[in-house]
Image (cartoon, rainbow, N blue to C red):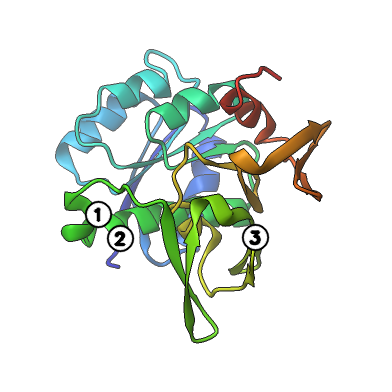
Amino acid sequence: MNTLSCLIVDDEPIAREIIQTYCSHLEQLKVVASCGNALDAKAVMQQKKVDILFLDINMPVIDGISFLKTIKSQPQVIFTTAYKEYALDAFDLSACDYLLKPFSFDRFIIAVDKAVERLQLQTGEGEATSEPKTENYIFIKTNGKIFKIGHDDLLYAEARGNNIRIVTNQHVLLPSMTFSGFEDTLPKALFLRVHRSFIINKSKISHIEGNRVFVGNTEIPIGSNYKEQFLKQLGFSS
């Protein structure tokens, strides 16, 4: 993919500098502007193409959530905030990811990878995007074979470095693909991210105990950054 234009919007100068530094380590990212408020950002977006928007939420005049609602042609949005309680609103607005400050460089990379993969899907539109996805299965290629996996057979997936471990009722697969790329192939109503390294099939949950969710007999940790949203998706408050 070609160079991606990035816009940083945060009222804290140190926060803007950290994101700009992180971006400088990734060759495909080019920061076109760094703004301290949403009004300045809006002016930039009227003049320049923005592929990825790094957006704070708690800002003066217009907060990040309200600002995003005013954008007609929405770029890939990665929220960067110290407030976890806005996560559900952010994902309702199709945000690409939600980074809680202070976040590490490796967590930043995961968010950017997700944005890049979404942009690649957009640029590779055509038959894949002309019709809504109605399939109840996915295809996974590994070890020279292509496996058809029904959504109901998929139990959970675990990030393993740059690859992924997929556990189904019949198989344990180790395809060469990114965790975020695999997540984007799954319907979000059925599969939930409960940890930076785990996605689970909601229908396979046997019970939840403390910071652990059990999928069958398998114990899976619930990440502190994901617990509130996870419980809300199940209809509970934390």
Location of mark 2 (residue) = 120
Residue 143 visible to an observer of this rendering: yes
Give x and y (percent) for residue 109: 53, 57
Give x and y (percent) for residue 121: 29, 57
Q: Residue at x 49, y 86 (%)?
A: 144
Q: Residue at x 51, y 69 (%)?
A: 177
Q: Is residue 60 left or right of residue 172?
A: left
Three-letter amino acid code at the position of disc 3: Asn
Q: Residue at x 22, y 52 (%)?
A: 129
At mark 3, the secondary structure is: loop
Q: Nearer the viewer, residue 152 or 223?
A: 152
Badge 1 vs badge 3, beta-carbon distance below 8 Å? no
What separation in Å lies between label 3 and label 2 (alpha carbons)?
31 Å
Q: Residue at x 46, y 50 (%)?
A: 186
Three-letter amino acid code at the position of disc 2: Gln
User: Tag on residue 122?
Assistant: 1
Ranked by sequence position, the earlier of labels 1 and 3 is 1
